[in-house]
Amino acid sequence: MAWHFLFPTRADQMLWRTASVAITVLPLLSVLIGLIWNLSKKETLPQIKNQNRTIEKKILGIIEVLTTIILIVLFFLHVSARLLLLGHAIWLLREQPVDVYRSVDWTLFIPYVL
C-alpha cells in the first residue's frame, strides 16, 4: 500500500519496497516448494527394477533434503523481512512532513442538521 508514499531518502524507499516484495513473494514460493516436496514423497514413478528403485529413492531423498533446507531459509527470510518492515516503519517516524502536525477541524465534517 505504501509503494508510492514519500520517503525521506531513496534508500528508505528501496528498503521498504524490497521488504514488501519479499513478504509477498516468499510465501508463494514456499507453497510451490512445498508442493514439490509433497510430490517427491509420492510413489509416482513406476517400479522397473530394484536397481533403479534404489537410485530413485536416493534422488527423492536429495530432493527432500534440498526442499527442507530451502523452506527453512525462506522462513527466516520472510520473518526477517517482516521485522525489517516493522522496524523501518518506526524508524521513518523520525522525519515526518510538517503537515502531520496540522490540526484538523473535525467539526467541519459533521453534517449540520437544523
Image: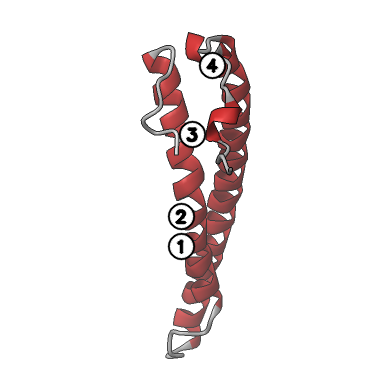
The type of residue carrying mark 3 is Ala
Mark 3 touches mark 4? (CB < 8 Å):
no
First in sequence: mark 1 vs mark 4: 1
Q: Position of residue 34 (x, y in %)?
A: 53, 64
Q: Label 4: which residue?
A: 100
> Which quarter shows the C terminus?
top right
In front: 108, or 33? 108
Q: Label 1: which residue?
A: 32
User: Residue drawn at (47%, 47%), measured in percent from left and top?
Assistant: 24
Q: Is residue 86 left or right of residue 58?
A: right
> Which quarter shows the N terminus?
top left
Q: Any mark on residue 29, and which?
A: 2
Please, what secondary structure does the residue beneath circle 3 have?
helix
Q: Any mark on residue 19, and which?
A: 3
Mark toward the viewer: 3 or 1:
3
Mark 1 touches mark 2? (CB < 8 Å):
yes
Alpha carbon distance from label 3 to label 4: 25 Å
First in sequence: mark 3 vs mark 2: 3
Alpha carbon distance from label 1 to label 2: 5 Å
First in sequence: mark 2 vs mark 4: 2
Mark toward the viewer: 3 or 4:
4
Q: Position of residue 78 (x, y in %)?
A: 57, 42
Mark 3 touches mark 2? (CB < 8 Å):
no
